[in-house]
Image (cartoon, rainbow, N blue to C red):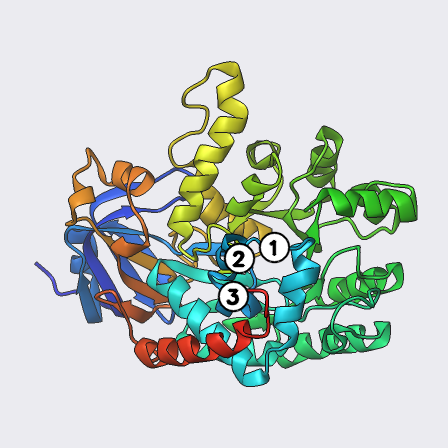
Amino acid sequence: MSAPTQSIDTLITHADVITFDDEGSLFDDGAIAIDNGSIVEIGPTAALTAKFSAIETVDAAGMIAMPGLIDAHLHTAQTMMRGLFPEIIHHGNLEQPMWRKYLIPFESNLTDDDMELSGRLAYSSLLLTGTTTFFDAGGPHPDAAARAAVDTGIRGIITRSTVDDSFDIPESMRLTTDQAIEENIGLVERWPAGGRVTGAMALRQIMNCSPELITAIHREATARGVKVHTHLLEGSDEIAFSVVRYGKRPVEFLTELEVFDSTLHCAHSVFASPWDVAAYARSGASVAHCANNYMFGVPRALEYWRSGVAIGLGTDGAATSPGTLDMFRITEAVGRGQQHIYGVPVHEHFLLEPDEPLRMATRGGARALNMSEKIGRLEAGLAADIVLLRTDGPDGVAVSPLAFLVDGATGRDVDTVFVDGRRVVEGGELTTIDVAETRARGVARQKDLVAAFQNV
């Protein structure tokens, strides 16, 4: 037998490889060759070990290899709010609307150091549970969040929260229209395309962003080839606001402004009419569907997905129920939720294909973030964002690796994570930062931040 002829950085061997590629390729005893941060080839272990000489070989026997999950809607700034709402509700003190009474006021109290700490907490949790990419929804001190992403080793898109048309929120969160535009442009220029951590633009929602800001941000984002992250069709109050102020539903209003297109990334998108869904499909506007959508509406995620809309899944951050950053749990909730909405009324027990929610969380998220040519599936030429899951736990008794992945796997099964070919999780431990020290600082700081809400 001739010696391997091609040198590479890393060779993962003996894995059950689930690629999520166009053909749905699966490899028993498969291998993945990685070099310069990208996937070089995927195939049988015997063939690739004969072809490649690797600096490092990772024996993944008994593990499943899959593409990294993508969190398409994350509020980094709300990470240390985890558990706040259950406590408020327990004491009977919850006020509405939550975004005005709690979410934005909490963010307004964050310092630059707080935002970096929030990022380190959130991104550590994402990586340890198999998420390799996130799209932040916008908060204060975005550069601090970007630094945290760089340090933890995750891939991410950072934005700045923009509000220029609301005076019933803390002053520190208000911006003039010109300030909001300048800060968005500056962020994109400081974190340009091509890096692992990049900048994009954001609009909080139409209830607190003026038409002038909406059109200006869209124009600047389009010129720079970046997305605009916003909340849309999230609540009935937003629809009432739009109808009263503009005489149109939100999608019609944004269409009239000529901004409802592929630049726009719309979180939640719960209260969509059938013609709204059709407008998303026509326009190219993308959607982030979150598990907490089921708490306040009847979301049409499956309808978006099967209509060709670019839809990914998101956690919405740690503040809102279910309060998890484990995207495996999100996919399970989405699968059950959409089955209940679409399957139960027509007495169809298995309306979704078994791997459909996971495809939303990988390929769907990549498309929604305009990153399909880089991430979302395991394929030669794409970034080596790879998750290895152990199957030796009590839930690992499954008829096939795919069956385990779609019907039992959670973040606790994640053993190893690569981002851009760099191993950032090994043996279930983060290799980039001290998680215990970060958690200890988070516990201490959370007490001070939560104390600001005296009714808890």
Residue 113 bears which disc, if any?
none
Task: Please say if 165 is above or below 15.
Answer: below
Along the horizontal axis of the image, is 422 left or right of 316? left
Quadrant of the rendered structure where residue 222 is?
A: bottom right
How packed mark 3 is, by other alpha carbons closer than 10 Å (few <14, some 14-19, many 20 or more), is many
Q: Decide if residue 278 is in sight here.
A: yes
Residue at image mark 3: 81
The answer to whether the residues at label 1 and label 2 have Cβ atoms under 8 Å apart is: yes
Disc 2, SS: helix
The answer to whether the residues at label 2 and label 3 have Cβ atoms under 8 Å apart is: yes
**Residue 219 location, x and y as percent?**
81, 63
Quadrant of the rendered structure where residue 416 is?
A: bottom left
Residue 85 bears which disc, if any?
2
As measured in the structure, the alpha-carbon distance from the residue carrying label 1 to the one carrying label 2 is 8 Å
The quadrant in which the N terminus is found is bottom left
Task: Please say if 185 is above or below 418.
Answer: below
Residue at image mark 1: 94
Residue type at mark 1: give it: Leu
Give the label, 1 or 3, closer to the camera. Answer: 1
As measured in the structure, the alpha-carbon distance from the residue carrying label 2 to the one carrying label 3 is 8 Å
Of residue 135 and residue 367, the one placed in the foreground of this image is 135
Q: Earlier in the sequence, mark 1 or mark 3?
A: 3
Q: Residue at x 69, y 47 (%)?
A: 285
Residue type at mark 3: give it: Met
Give the label, 2 or 3, closer to the camera. Answer: 2
